Image (spheres, rainbow, N blue to C red):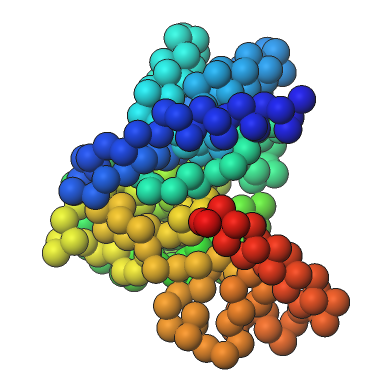
């Protein structure tokens, strides 16, 4: 059934993804990419899985959505009409009427499959009793973010993981050096002190991790806690590059790998061997082999893995060549 649904989605995408003018420029885009989330009590979240999946298939929308008792989270892509139809369907549920949605655009389909998965948390921190609906930090709009982080009394913390921070972050931001969001509470316990760090500002890709991280800090006794409304994506969309305090690209969890100011496609490729984003300079190194390895993992993967990845990439290239004939 899953394969059949994915074929249906692929056909719908091919037929409905008509190019349209990018709202922030002249680029002709085929796909709308929507990152969305909502923290809200969904006691019947298991019953929502199949209807939402069916509607995604019906509207030709690919990507992944996560459902848990605490809400919904995910990133999806499709035609303008398909995304609008899906958002309308979701927000018809009064509990999801306040759905946070941030859009960007792509010339190629960022996802190939349609998934709706059931989870314990929609963003996994692993700490019981953290509810952003009860207590959360102060939201700061993108237009006001520069003023906040220019305050010398503010400790600016990037809540994302090491591979995300590596390709871009805000000037002066603290890197927690985490490999997963589960490690973030330990970083707070070891590196932050409510008596010493009286003003803390945090940011993440789309805003969802900050909902939990600010709630966690409030629980720990931090009083002045702020976070960027809409995340980095909203900042890059709204703040002119000449006024920006953002350095580098922003990692995104889809085929595009990264985006820059004005949400234009970044320069990074994803290494299949280790999953690390590879910048343009690293792509020029002899240790970089597309679909196989990069400078970050070339001396770590085994010969068996290298042979397997090489064969996989050969088949991909072969199929791509056939499709272009």
Q: Position of residue 126 (x, y in %)?
A: 70, 44
Farthest residue, direction right: 304
Residue 245 at what x, y percent from top left?
Answer: 24, 64
**141 on left or right of 225:** left
In the visual, does 102 lie left or right of 145?
right
The residue located at (49%, 17%) in the rendering is 90
Query: Is residue 67 found left or right of 37 in the rendered image?
Result: right
Where is residue 205? Give x, y as percent.
Answer: 43, 50
Q: Is residue 132 above or below residue 53?
A: below
Observer-nearest of 46 and 69 = 46
Disc tally is 0
Task: Report the side of 47 relative to 203 (left or right).
Answer: right
Q: Residue at x 21, y 56 (%)?
A: 146
Whether residue 298 is situated above or below residue 36 in the rendered picture: below
Residue at 65% across, 43% down: 124
Location of residue 289 by image quarter: bottom right
Q: Position of residue 219 (x, y in %)?
A: 54, 40
Q: Residue at x 48, y 59 (%)?
A: 257
**In front here: 143 or 77?**
77
* Placement of 247 over or under 133, stated as above or below: below
In the depicted view, which residue is nearer to us: 125 or 222? Answer: 125
Q: Where the N terminus falls, by quadrant?
A: top right
Kindly tell me whether residue 195 is visible in this rendering: no
- Find the residue positioned furthest to the front: 325
- Is residue 234 visible in the rendered image? The answer is yes
Where 260 falls versus 52 (above or below)?
A: below
């Amino acid at each position: 059934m899953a394969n059949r649904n994915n074929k249906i989605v692929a056909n719908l995408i091919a037929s409905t993804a008509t190019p349209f003018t990018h709202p922030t420029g002249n680029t002709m885009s085929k796909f709308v990419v929507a990152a969305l989330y909502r923290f809200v009590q969904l006691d019947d979240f298991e019953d929502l899985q199949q209807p939402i999946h069916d509607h995604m298939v019906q509207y030709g929308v690919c990507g992944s959505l996560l459902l848990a008792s605490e809400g919904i989270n995910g990133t999806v892509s499709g035609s303008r009409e398909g995304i609008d139809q899906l958002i309308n369907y979701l927000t018809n549920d009064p509990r999801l009427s306040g759905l946070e949605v941030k859009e960007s655009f792509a010339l190629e389909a960022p996802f190939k499959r349609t998934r709706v998965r059931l989870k314990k948390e929609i963003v996994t921190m692993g700490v019981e009793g953290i509810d952003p609906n009860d207590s959360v930090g102060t939201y700061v709009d993108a237009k006001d973010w520069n003023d906040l982080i220019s305050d010398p009394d503010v400790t600016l913390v990037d809540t994302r993981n090491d591979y995300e921070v590596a390709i871009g972050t805000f000037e002066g931001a603290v890197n927690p050096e985490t490999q997963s969001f589960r490690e973030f509470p330990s970083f707070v316990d070891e590196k932050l002190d409510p008596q010493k760090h009286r003003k803390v500002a945090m940011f993440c890709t789309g805003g969802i991790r900050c909902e939990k991280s600010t709630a966690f800090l409030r629980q720990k006794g931090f009083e002045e806690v702020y976070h960027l409304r809409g995340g980095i994506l909203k900042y890059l969309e709204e703040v002119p590059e000449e006024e920006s305090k953002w350095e580098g690209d922003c990692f995104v969890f889809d085929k595009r790998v990264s985006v820059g100011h004005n949400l234009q496609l970044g320069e990074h490729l994803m290494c299949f061997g280790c999953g690390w984003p590879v910048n343009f300079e690293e792509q020029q190194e002899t240790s970089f082999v597309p679909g196989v390895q990069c400078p970050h993992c070339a001396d770590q993967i085994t010969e068996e893995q290298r042979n397997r990845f090489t064969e996989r990439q050969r088949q991909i290239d072969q199929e791509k060549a056939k499709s272009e004939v």
